[in-house]
């Protein structure tokens, strides 16, 4: 029972970290795109 809770907690943590990495990548891409857009003006 306790082992299953630990596994679930670890999976949640991994999911949270991978989501954070994905959003971080997306925000960096958006920032670069915004920089290019303002440079083109």
Image (cartoon, rainbow, N blue to C red):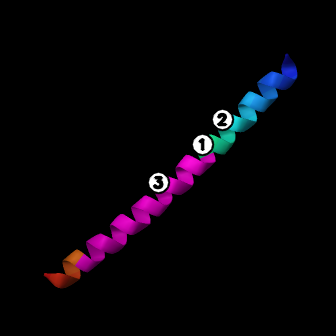
Residue 2, percent from left and from top? 85, 20
Left or right, 30 with respect to 25, comes to: left
Eyeballing the image, is 35 above or below 13?
below
Report the residue at 55% width, 56% height from top.
Answer: 21
- Which image quarter is the C terminus in? bottom left
Please identify the quarter of the rendering in which residue 7 is found. Answer: top right
Q: CA distance from mark 1 to mark 2?
A: 6 Å
Report the residue at 41% width, 61% height from top.
Answer: 27
> Which callout, 1 or 3, points at the residue further toward the start of the chain?
1
Q: How many marks?
A: 3
Magenta-tinted stretch: 17-36
Residue where numbered disc 1 is placed: 16
Eyeballing the image, is 39 above or below 28?
below
Residue where numbered disc 3 is placed: 23
CA neighbours of label 1 inside 10 A, class few (<14), some (14 to 19), many (20+)? few
Left or right, 9 with respect to 40, comes to: right
Q: CA distance from mark 2 to mark 3?
A: 16 Å
CA neighbours of label 3 inside 10 A, class few (<14), some (14 to 19), many (20+)? few
Magenta stretch contains residue 19: yes
Give the dominant element type of the magenta stretch: helix, strand or loop: helix
> Which callout, 2 or 3, points at the residue further toward the start of the chain?
2
The label shown at residue 12 is 2
């Amino acid at each position: 029972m306790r082992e299953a809770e630990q596994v679930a907690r670890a999976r949640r943590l991994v999911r949270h970290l991978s989501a954070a990495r994905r959003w971080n990548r997306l925000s960096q891409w958006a920032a670069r795109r915004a920089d290019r857009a303002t440079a083109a003006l």
